[in-house]
Every structure is written in structure tokens, then in C-alpha cells.
Amino acid sequence: MAADGALEIFPQIQALVLDKLQVVSYKWLSRNFSVSSNYAKRLLREFAEKHCNELEVIYTLSGWLKSEPQAYCVKLASTYKLEEVKQVFKDNCSVQVYSVQACIPSDLAVIWNAEFVQAEELFNQPLTEGNCLRDNRFCGVSNSFVKRIVDGKHVGAAAPWPMNGKRVAIESKGISTVKGQPIQHPQQGSGAKNGMQSSIAVSSDNSEKVALDAASKVTKPPLIKESVSGGNTGKNKGQNVKSSSGTTSSLASLWGNASAKSKPAAPAAETAIDTSIAAATAEAQICAHEALDAANSEDEDHHNNHKRERNSVSGRKRRVFLDFSDDDDEEENVTSLSSPDVFKGKHAAESLPKTESLLDRSKPNTAEPKGDRLSDGLDSTKGKNSSLPSDADERIASITMGGISLKKKTNSYNQGDTDKNNKDVATTSTSPKRRKVLKTRIDDRGREVTEVIWEGETADSNMPEKNISVNDSANRPPVANKAQAAGIAASTNPGKGGNKKPGKGGLKDAKQGNILSFFKRV
Amino acid sequence: MLELRLVQGSLLKKVLESIRELVTDANFDCSATGFSLQAMDSSHVALVALLLRSEGFEHYRCDRNLSMGMNLNNVSKMLRCAGNDDIITVKADDGSDTVTFMFESPNQDKIADFEMKLMDIDSEHLGIPDAEYQAIVRMPSSEFARICKDLSSIGDTVIISVTKEGVKFSTAGDIGTANIVCRQNKTVDKPEEATIIEMQEPVSLTFALRYLNSFTKATPLSETVAISLSSDLPVVVEYKIAEMGYIRFYLAPKIEEDDDMKP
């Protein structure tokens, strides 16, 4: 069996661990594939050796402690800490693979999740179904209180069988009545219910998988279930809802460690846990207890927080009352003092437009003195809506948009691009009837002079002037032209790279190593 | 005769998008083992090496070694005409000066043919020796991209220092300085999210962020990135391409003249 089984099981483990990122522990393996836990451990060890590079292994170490010679201790350890933990034990401890997973999970509860879901599934199966947990098939412990069924034969005696069975029945009934759906997917329903989708959604993949695996083995005749539920009378009817949330609560306890998001559901979960305790099965019971504790402590924290918050809020208000208790019109004071938020909001709202308008002004100011005057001109004429944007207009608009120093070169540049700018301008600025026009020329002393003049309806008359100035720019010394061109390039490419490259190119080259100095040509 | 059929056509699109910013023209070398490319950027500071192994293709046929010079922007233009789910087939005849890209929609109801002219590019092939790196940092690729992007808004070079505590990315600029430290973190929900540092000895190198930022264009190709550092060697930024190969970027470090720059 060993060889055959391994051949069958390995690919499945691989798919689960590496693709679905599930934690596969020996317990899970043993129950899922109905193999003994020792064999499951061996399988996992073999698997881990084969795939040691792709996955993380958690070992279980057991033995007598050095510090307390009386204590037999079982510890879990990851590969990294294996040696370290070994030191804690006396001479020889047993080291077995506990689980394999793609990575060591940040939330350690994940290690236990798949197992728990599986255990729950098994206990949720109808009574007629025999399974490895119920008949204790793989149990290694043997004494008079443990009942074990191996191949249909009872081993051991005095089992708490009936009680156990009843609990299971109650729980399974709870689920089935509420959901009217196969048991195999309690997680989903409860997840939606609790509003814990986020926490469950993460893990639902896993749990579903487990559920499906289990489902493939479970055949659950609904008739039997009905009869079972019929057998449980009145009390259960009243509990239907509760016990259903009971199962959700045990699920909540499952994911309980992922606290923050499940908090809103905590009060419901708490009451639910109370009822579910009665309905829990052996393992689940312990879990429920733990979860209850967790939920309680979480809840307490939660409440405390609430209280503190409330205290702080109401305390402040009360203080207000006290301070102004002398005054006749308490209410006024209270309202005025307790509503600073409103005031703030108002203030902010009021001040917003102001700052905006300030910004509007300051933007061009900081940008460029020339652009400033220009855009002011535009601002002043903004209100008036005139339709026909002329060439000159567009030029101005595009110039101010660029926020660049205006030179004749720019003019000519923009002239070429008027068509392109046309649309932008049409949307961003309304064209005034009378507008300022920027003119740049070289004066007699060779300096560049930029003038802003008002251009009226007689735009046409100005056009020749402009052309002249453009021509002037063409006559300028080539060096200056180059610089301007660079400036234009930089400012018209708003991209950072464009700005950085020309500025720092020189520096970079000095320090930047060359790849050819590391690799030789072939 | 060359014929390669790639079911996951979007992969080729992503590959092109990740290198075309760095390199404009390059030779694609096809051999029986796979489809590869090696090219330097124009300033000879960075080098990109791409390998797509033949096993990764649904169908791969390459009768004799073939080197196809292409303008990557043009290839990208062609590939952009392919849908993300399309199956892409690249075909070229021996001695032909064109290459054909064929795009098939997943349900086979649309087939598009694009023929592109090849060009002659004399490129030098560099021999990249296998080297032991002093430190290898594996981290989520999106995290690395974010860091490079963030730092480039403050400075234009980054000092990457690896110590046993973690990896530190620091920069300085006109407006101030920035330090980002990523600690080793193996306890995560998915292996891709882990930050793993394998370090032989501490190493600290300076690089131009501009190049690193263009390397991060390959982020969609892989969830993790491996950064291998050694003093006196170019950094290697490697993105694995699922079950097919890799894309590796090499970047020459900036030469430290003044020691006080070092942390």
C-alpha cells in the first residue's frame, strides 16, 4: 500500500500545498486519505524531502525536557528553529513532520484551520455514516475509555457513543434547518451572515476545498437527517436559530484570531457560542471554549474602547456644563462649545475658496513674473464671454499654460502648434474681446525686452508687429536660440525625465559606471 | 523556418512593454533552446537579457539559429493589436527580411496577421559570467517598484545597502532625504509576499534611479523580484517569467568618489 498510496497522494499534496497554498498536516492527511497517522507522517516526511526547496516544514518534537525532567513535552518548530528547539529536550527526542505548507503563515491559526474544518465536517456527517473520527479508527491511545472500531469491529469498551452521537445530531440539524442546503458549505453561509466575509473570504478557498473533499466521501440522505431532527424536540426548535448561529460562532472561533474585522459580529457570536457549547463535539468543544475566551476578551476590549470613547466625548461635554453652570443660558454655551467641529467645518469651507483664490493668484506669481501679468489680464476678462478665439489668443493661453518665460521663439513655436493647442485653449480659457499680448524684442543695447500691451479689436494690425518680432528672434545668436529651445523642450515636456536629463546629464556621466567595463564582448 | 506559438500571448506583450523603454532596437536570437534577447541601452549603462525557453511555448520550431533585428517600439505597436487572451504565433522564413505575428482569439473566430519588416542591427553580444553575489534580496516586485518610484521623486540616485537586518534603499535630493528599510520577512500568507535576504557579506552600492524605474516596467511579469548585489559588479534585477525563463536587467553602479556618501 505504501508505494501505491504515496504515488497517488503525492500529486494531491503537491497541488494543495503549492497551488492552493493549503497547510497539509499529518492529521488532515490521515483523515482525508484514511491512512494511519504514522503513515501520514512518513508520507509527509518523504514529500518534504522531495520538495524541500519549494515548501516550508513544521516539525513536531516530543520528548522529556531538560529543564523539567518530569515533563513530557511536544513542541512545534519550523525548519529554521529546529536545532534550537532540539536543545530544549533531553538527549533524544522524536522529530516528525507535523505539516507542510508553501510558507510559514503569519497567523499561526492557519496551521490548524484545515484540520479543524475537516474535523467539523466529519462530525457533521449523519449518524449512519461511519468515519475515522467517530470510530476512532486511527487512535493510538488505548484504554478502557477509548472505543475504537477497526474494520467494523469494536475495540475497547465503555464508549461515550450515544452522547457523542446526540451532540453531533444537534449540531448538524442546526445547520441543515437554517440553510436547507448540503452541510458541506456551512462556511459560506455563516460567512455571509456574520459579515466576516473579508476574513473568511481569504480562507474560504481552503475550507471549501476541504469541504469538497469531504463531500466526495459523504453521501448524506436528507431523510435520515429529518428523522434525527424530528427526534430532537421543542427545545431544539427554539434553538434552531441559535444553534445555527452556534455553528457560525464556532466558525467565528475558527477565524477568531483575525480579530479586527470580525469584531462587529462579536456580540452575536458570543451569545451563539453559549448555545453552541452544548452542541459541540469533543474537539469542537475545546475550540469553542477557547474561542469564547477569545471572543470575551476581544469583546471586553471592544466595550472598553467604546466606553473610553464615550467617556471622553461625554466627559468633555459635561465639563462644559460645569464650567458655564453660572451662566443662565447653558444651552447656548453648550451648543457653541460642543460644536467646534461644525465651526471648523464651516471655517474650512469658507476659507477654502479663499485659499483657492489665493492660490489662483499666487500660482502665476510664483511661476513667472511675465506670466503673471498675462494671466491677470486673462482673469480680468474671464467673465466676459466672447466667442471667437483668435490666433493671438491661443498663443497667449498656451504660453501661460506652459508657465514658461516668453520669448519670440516661443511665439513661433506656438504658432506652429496653434492647431494642436486650439482645443485645449477652447476648454480652459474664455476668449476676451480685449486682451494683453506679449511682445519680446531686442532693444538697442542688445537686451531682450518683453512687453505686455493691450490688443483690442484691431488684432490684425498687431499681427505684422508680431511677425517682425519673430523674425528678430530668428536673427538672434545661435547660442541663445539653443538655450531657449532647451528651455522650451523642458517646459513643454512636463515629464520629470525630460527636466532631469539635460540638467544632470553631465554629472551623471562622470560617475556612472559603464556596463562594458564589467562584461566583455564576445 | 521559425515558428513559435505562445498560448499566453499577453506574456509577450508584457515582455515588450518591459524592455522597450530601455532599448529601442535589438536582435531577437532564436535557437533550438529558446527565444532570447540581449541588448544594452544607448548609454551602455544597463543591459537587458531575456530568455524564453522553448518548453514554454505550445509549439516551438527553429530549424537553424536565427537573429532578427527589430525596432522594439514597432514590435510593441504590432503586439498591442493582440488581445490579452489571444494566442500569438511568431513566424519567420529563413533568409526572409520580415517576421509575421499571428493573433488568434481564444475561440478561434478571429485571426489577424501582422507582417513586420526586420532591420539589420549590429549589436555586440556580451559574455556575462556566472558570479557569486554577495547578497541576494528577494521581495515582492510591486514593493520594489513602489520604492523606486517613491525615491525617484526625491533624488535621482539610490544607495542600496544590504545588512543582516535588511535591505535599505536611501536617497537624497534638494528637498531632503529618504530611507526605506525592508526587513527579512518569511512569515506571510503567500510565498510571493516574503522578503528574503541571502547575504554573504554586507554590501552597499549606488545606482541611478532612472534605470531602476525602467526596470520595474517588468513588474507585471512576476510577483517577485530578485536583486543580486556585489561590489564591483553590476546589480542584477531579475524577474522570473512563469515556467518559461526570465528577464534580467544589469545596471552598472555609480562610482563612489567620496567616501562620505557611504552610509
Image (cartoon, rainbow, N blue to C red):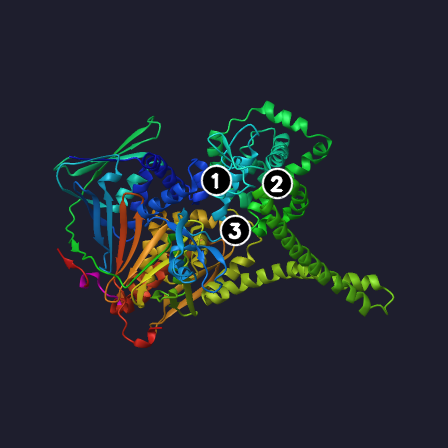
| Subunit of label 1 | A
Q: Amino acid at mark 3?
A: Thr
Q: Position of residue A79 (x, y in %)?
A: 38, 55
User: For the residue labelled by badge 3, is the local secondary structure a helix, a strand or a loop?
Assistant: loop
In the displayed structure, A258 sits above or below B31; it is below
Residue A430 is labelled as: 3
Q: Position of residue A86 (x, y in %)?
A: 40, 59
Q: Nearer the viewer, residue B212 or A47?
A: A47
How far apart marks 1 and 3 lie (CA) works out to: 58 Å
Q: Amino acid at mark 2?
A: Ala
Residue A159 is labelled as: none
Residue A205 is labelled as: 1
| Subunit of label 3 | A
Compared across the picture, whether B231 is left or right of B138 comes to: left
How far apart marks 3 and 2 lie (CA) works out to: 75 Å
Q: Position of residue B2 (x, y in %)?
A: 18, 36
Name the residue: 52% across, 61% down.
Answer: A376
What residue is shown with label 2? A280
- Residue neighbourhood size for the residue with mark 3, other residues' Cα within 10 Å, grouped as few (<14), some (14–19), many (≥20): many
Name the residue: 83% across, 61% down.
Answer: A331
Q: Amino acid at mark 1?
A: Asp
- Residue neighbourhood size for the residue with mark 1, other residues' Cα within 10 Å, grouped as few (<14), some (14–19), many (≥20): some
User: For the residue labelled by badge 2, is the local secondary structure a helix, a strand or a loop?
Assistant: loop
Discs 2, 1 touching: Cβ within 8 Å = no
Residue B119 drawn in magenta: no
